[in-house]
Amino acid sequence: MNNLQAITNHYLEFCQYQKRLDSKTLKAYRIDLRQFSAQIGVNEIPSITTEVLEKFIAALHLNYKPKTVKRKIASVKAFFHYLEYKDVIDTNPFNKIQIKFREPVILPKTIPLHPMEALLAAMYQQYRSAESCRQKRNILRDIAVVELLFATGIRISELCSLKASSINLFEKTILIYGKGAKERRIQIGNEDVVSILQKYSREYKKEIECTGYFFVNHFSRPLSDQAVRRMINKYTSLTPIKLHITPHMFRHTFATCLLENDVDIRYIQEMLGHSSINITEIYTHVALSKQRDILTTKHPRKDFHI
């Protein structure tokens, strides 16, 4: 079987049912391989030579940022490894291509602690002054969402897919199913956060039992990431914060704050669910305030009297 489209479909089934890749990874593979097939204009696998791949990669560099190019190349390379594995090809054309390009370091955007506190303060104030029971319930859920984002560094996709059975408020732990179906367990270390989650859990007990998900809307459906983004924008607009805050920034802030407080980076890697320490090390570039504090208070030059 040498038809590119047919074997691509077999490969995607292999990724879904044997490799057990998550839906977002499968979607990315499907998009990348469809684009690859359309761009190279070749239907038979033996016709895909090193030269064809080099032209495809060159076209990617012209149209996408380095991070996107890297991902698309990785998708196609994984596909060719599969072709080798299934003996569809004798020689992998990628073996004769050297792919090296510098990917610019994009530092994660964090939320400074004063705006973070101001956002939570505004939400709690809205809760205390709510005029109706429905409004009070909605704000309670919103506070629970933001508190958990900040307390655990959980991804927005992980939060929205968090099952009620995965959170244990008695033991103060949550079981998170992250990328690549990897599991990790995180402790909720702050009693105020535990308290607000318990309060939310009691208030939304009926909806939670109906859906099986922990975070739900008043239609008894799982909370969507779009709803969380809109909610954060709404509360940010009630404060003097001049910053566009996204759900992922809570994750970056969580990691950076821990690093600045001398938490070992391998613990942070485990809590974030990163597969490689190299991914977590991006936060070492962000923790400049800690570096400034060290060099201001610890460097011996401060004791010189000249």
Image (cartoon, rainbow, N blue to C red):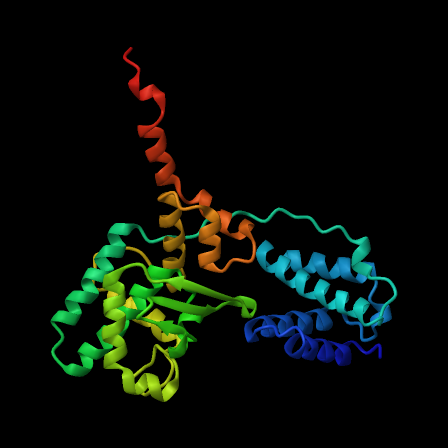
Instruction: State the residue at coordinates (68%, 71%).
Output: 33
Image quadrant containing the N terminus: bottom right
Residue 305 picture location, percent across and down: 27, 12
Instruction: State the residue at coordinates (65%, 79%).
Output: 17
Does any portion of residue 225 appear in the rendered image? no
Q: Residue 140 versus residue 263: which sits nearer the camera?
A: 263
Q: Residue 85 versus residue 188: which sits nearer the camera?
A: 188
- In-image side of 289 versus 100 (left or right): left
Q: Residue 273 versus residue 143: which sits nearer the camera?
A: 273
In this view, 291 is above or below 41: above
Image quadrant containing the C terminus: top left
Residue 30 picture location, percent across and down: 64, 74
In this view, 124 is above or below 137: above
- In-image side of 247 versus 86 (left or right): left
The quadrant in which residue 135 appears is bottom left
Instruction: State the residue at coordinates (49%, 60%).
Output: 273
Instruction: State the residue at coordinates (13%, 70%).
Output: 128
In this view, 106 is above or below 177: above
Residue 278 picture location, percent across and down: 55, 49
Q: Residue furthest front?
A: 171
